[in-house]
Image (cartoon, rainbow, N blue to C red):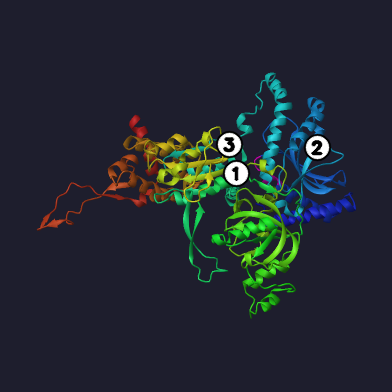
Amino acid sequence: MINDDLKNKILYGFKYFTNRYAQDITYRKGDKTTHDKLSNFCENFKIFSNDIFSEFKIVDHGKWQNSGNISKYIWNRYKPFKNESHLVIYFAVLAKPSNFYISIGLIDTKLSDAEKKLKNEIYNFLESECKKIHIPGFRLDKLAWEKYIYFAIENIETFATLDYTSLLNALTNVYHLTYEKFYKNTENNQQNNSDSEGYKMTDDDKKSTSPLNQILYGPPGTGKTYSTVTKAIEIIEERKVDISKNRNDLKKKFDGYIRSGQIKFVTFHQSYGYEEFVEGIKPILGNSETDNNKEIKYDIEDGIFKTLCKMAQNIEGKTSNKFDFNDNINFWKMSLGDSQKPEEDFVFEYCIKNNVVLLGFGDWINFSGCENAKQISKRMEKEMVDFSATAINRLKNEIKNGDIILISLGNKKLRAVARVTGEYKYLDRDDLESFVQARSVEWIFIPDEPIYYEKILYKQFSQMSIYNIKDNLKIDEFKQIFTKDSQKIEKNYILIIDEINRGNISKIFGELITLIEPSKRLGADDEIMVELPYSKEKFGVPSNLYIIGTMNTADRSIALMDTALRRRFEFVEMMPQPELLKDIKIIKNGDDTDIKLNEMLKTINDRIEYLYDRDHTIGHAYFMSLKDGADIEELASIFKNKILPLLQEYFYDDWEKIRLVLGDNGLIKEKEKDRKLLVLDGKEYETDKILYEIKFEAFKEPENYIKIYEQNKMQEQ
């Protein structure tokens, strides 16, 4: 995510660039102000661009001046994979008409003869494919003097928060299709006539394919949880991820998907159950606005699995095609009755049928003529402005015609969206009980099923009956509801279950274990839906929900896993990879110790496998915190605090076996007996028990680590 400082610098530089170009495109040497400001803007834009295209190959970066003139474009060019074509994806700023844009096209000044012949065909194909892409926040456009179309940013002020990932994924797909159609045969022919082997696109380049249900299993410290980050991003973005890239960048992207609700993470344990995972009955306090006694009520609350399944399904419902967004409108949240009171269900139904929203405050008082909360409070004969007066004032005076009202269902779901069309009115009707304060509305969206807040909000709805929600709204995601064909936009969702083998699978999944099978998912030939026990809802698992589990084989073998679970998951074994430690040098007092971590770990694991089994070997991840040139103190800390306690757990404090694993390297020594310690009736008590002690000072000596693997070599010799 771009920081505010860089964002502000880019916006400032962009405004200067467009204004300077509009005034005079000529640049004269010695104009230090223009030089410095445009150079800084160009560099800041490049930093942002390279971050957005971090997974791409950089082709080149444009300049802000050209032959004594200020350039109309400042561009950066990229390719999703290495190839010899002149097909690139641009990220550029344009001075006139001023905008940021992302496009796919050819570098016209460098075309080969074959590309020149195909140029018009390529551009026509690119245009037809790009017209299929609809990403909120971007507008498809075309310059009269250019061949290619581009995606312009609709609102420059929001450039730092747009969904570039979805747009680049779509353009990458177009790039692959174009490359396949116009270049692949040409490049293959060139490879056949050449001694050197050129690039050949593989299926992995095009798209990452992953099983719907998979479990990563192996001994502790083999990077199972670590790997879920990469696998989740590959599934969501439908491409292979280069794991050699900066891990921090991948983690930031992963955290972004967590915040958006597209990835959810849960850890199974013995007390985890169906109620937390699918749905259950939970106690809640009454609405503090209306229930002074705050009595405890009970509600059916969706668990993490049901929530994610609902989020993964396409939004369907009645949508008004007449609606369009205006930057001046405000967005409000309202509750139409208390969702915890069945006797107030009529409020929502009445509002839908009669095109109004109703508020249940005000004691049957008509507030016409009241222009603020104080006047409303006075008419209610109250000395202070309380929430009821504030709520009525919001409904009557603060909400304007054209504003949008989101109707919540509890704190976590959206049940309808309305546009305000009329001024405040008082409904003098006994059948509405206290809900007589009204505004006329047009219902612009009523979903078939309530929508989870995470699809459109950064955080869940407040219990407050009416308030401004604009700052909490994911405006681009919200707009998708009203975008033509938005129902066809399908994202992949990920549920990561850490320690999946530690939970009681029958207790957690219940009757839903069958539904996760690919052939039983929604839309499949053998689709199955069940009725949930508490809510009585019909429920199925969508085909764009992926489940990634992790399993520590030191806790439980695969053979002991629940049979129902084993049949429905694909298993990916993850064993220790000592070779990853090969290039890490350990230093003591500034000198290389010659400790070979890879050989040391391999030898330890060979001995563990012989003395115990391969499920209890030690993973490379325990040592991955060591960087090249790490001090021996860091290695000593890992052995003292992680490796030795693990071996003690494995071998139940059988120190003789632990010494065998470590090759009798001096870290553990037999303790001398104190014969005077055990005396009975003046006689020393005899015992065959051998005591051991850990020589902590030995952890700082390099030879004690080298002995672990060198002992085998000496015996072989």
Badge 2 density bin: few <14, some 14–19, many ≥20, Cα 10 Å: many
The residue sitting at 37% across, 41% down in the picture is: 556
Residue 36 can be seen in this image: no
Q: Which residue is mark 3?
A: 523
Asked which quadrant contains residue 559, the reply is top left
Location of residue 365 with respect to 344 vertically, above or below? below
Left or right of 436 in this view: 711: left
Give how far across and how far down residue 579 sits, in percent.
Answer: 48, 36
- Residue 89 drawn at (x, y percent): 73, 38
Measured Cα–Cα span from mark 2 to mark 3: 37 Å
Which residue in the rendered view is the most extreme toward the top? 193
What is the spatial separation of the Cα atoms under label 3 and label 1, in whole angstroms?
A: 11 Å
* Residue annotated with mark 1: 313
**What label sits on residue 148 in the rendered view?**
2
Position of residue 309 relative to residue 373, above or below, is: above
Foreground residue, 712 or 385? 385
Front tag of 2 and 3: 3
Q: Earlier in the sequence, mark 2 or mark 1?
A: 2
Q: Point out the stretch of residues depicted in magenta.
A: 49-55
Looking at the picture, tell me which residue is in the foreground, 208 or 568: 568
- Identify the secondary structure beneath mark 3: loop
Secondary structure beneath dot 2 equals loop
**Mark 1: which amino acid?**
Gln
